Image (cartoon, helix red, strand yellow):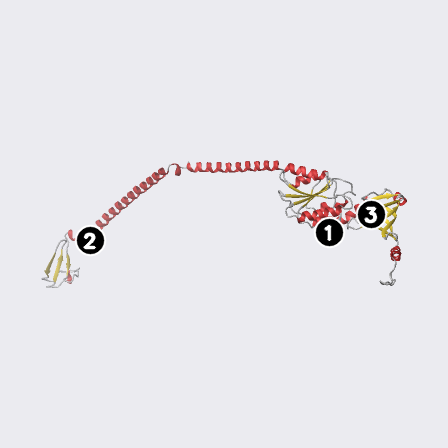
Amino acid sequence: MTAKTSPEQPLPIRSVLQMVAQWIGRLGVVWAEGQITEFSSRGGTVFLTLRDPVANVSARVTCPRGVYEATVPRPVDGARVVMLVKPDFWVNRGSFAFTALEIRPVGVGELLARLERLRQIIVAEGLANADRKRRLPFLPHVVGLICGRDSAAERDVLENARRRWPAVRFTVEQVAVQGPYAVTEVTEALRKLDADREVDVIVIARGGGSLEDLLPFSDESLVRAVSACLTPVVSAIGHEQDNPLIDLVADVRASTPTDAAKKVVPDVGEQLTLITQLRDRGRRVVTGWLDREHAWLTAVRSRPALADPVRELDRRAEQVDALKDRTRRSLSSSLDRAEDSLTHLRARLDALSPAGTLRRGYAIVQRPDGEVVRQAAEIKENDLLTLRFPDSRVTVTATADPTP
């Protein structure tokens, strides 16, 4: 391949192809894993395509019939195998292919081990966490359905959903649900429906099958595509006992396609029954409340204060009259006692007053300045004195010294 060439000194194409074949022949043999597709046989040679189950990559493989028949069990279209291959370049046709020297089927135990490792990776990354799950809409306007072409799963989902809610609409994407193209087609349909704003929920449905048939739904690329969807996804793959990895990341897992229809749309009959029950319950609650309020109002109206308001006024008026009479009697009694006390006090004052003494025949001797003469020795001859009687007074002149 390092030969010097130019437009003037080109190499013949046979030389170029021989050089390519020499370089490819230096690669030796290698073990490769893949999925068999496009299986055919002619004469003593078996022709097939070995496809990578994850990436959209494949290569042609020719297998001598003896090598193919020596493999137990014999591989069929869609089988996962490990091959010891040698790269060959056919100079005459300018084509490249692998030649199979040995074929070994990938056993179920190994498949399960690989699925378990992938499951652990998904769980470790948090793709299966419950907090990432989204709730399904109560009544989706449009349901996206990914299923096989003319499959029983499609009929189960459509018929059961429309039986439960006749007005539900579907956008159906029919794809391959097993085989080499299943992962690619399901992923493309999933992205298409996720980009459609009218689609409220996506259902991925497939009937039951063997572990190998359901392998596309445990493919890592498809699992991550489901996890990245913005639209809620319902996984309805296989039967109850089937657990593809897509079930881990889907927002809701349905045991069967029929179960998926029940989870996606409500039953119109059940909803009408529920509405009727709630309406009856609401009527009973309101009626009970009205009955309680009516009973309370009746009890309030039956109270004396509201049953005969004037009676209460009359009772209060009687109380006022009684208090008024009591007040009058109390005041009259107090006045009588005060009058008696005043009479007794007046009598005592009269008994003790000088006027009372004078009325008993006594007189008071006073000087002109009003000073009372208490003893006769205080009087001198010719002193002017006033004699005070109960009803009058007389002025006199002392004529002789008083006798002791």
Near mark 2 (Cα within 10 A), the count class, few <14, some 14-19 or many ≥20, is: few
Q: Residue furthest front?
A: 8
Nearest the eye: 218 or 302 = 218
Q: Nearer the viewer, mark 1 or mark 3?
A: 3
- Residue type of the residue flagged with mark 2: Ser
Q: Is residue 128 visible?
A: no
Which residue position is annotated with label 2?
Answer: 353
Tell me: residue 180, above or below residue 379: above
Nearest the eye: 76 or 364 = 76
Near mark 1 (Cα within 10 A), the count class, few <14, some 14-19 or many ≥20, is: few
Which quadrant is home to the N terminus?
bottom right
What is the distance, in whole Å, between disc 1 and disc 3 at their CAs?
Answer: 35 Å
Circles 1 and 3 in contact, beta carbons < 8 Å: no
Q: Position of residue 108 (x, y in %)?
A: 81, 44
Which residue position is annotated with label 3?
Answer: 49
Q: Quadrant of residue 269?
A: top right
Q: Earlier in the sequence, mark 2 or mark 1?
A: 1
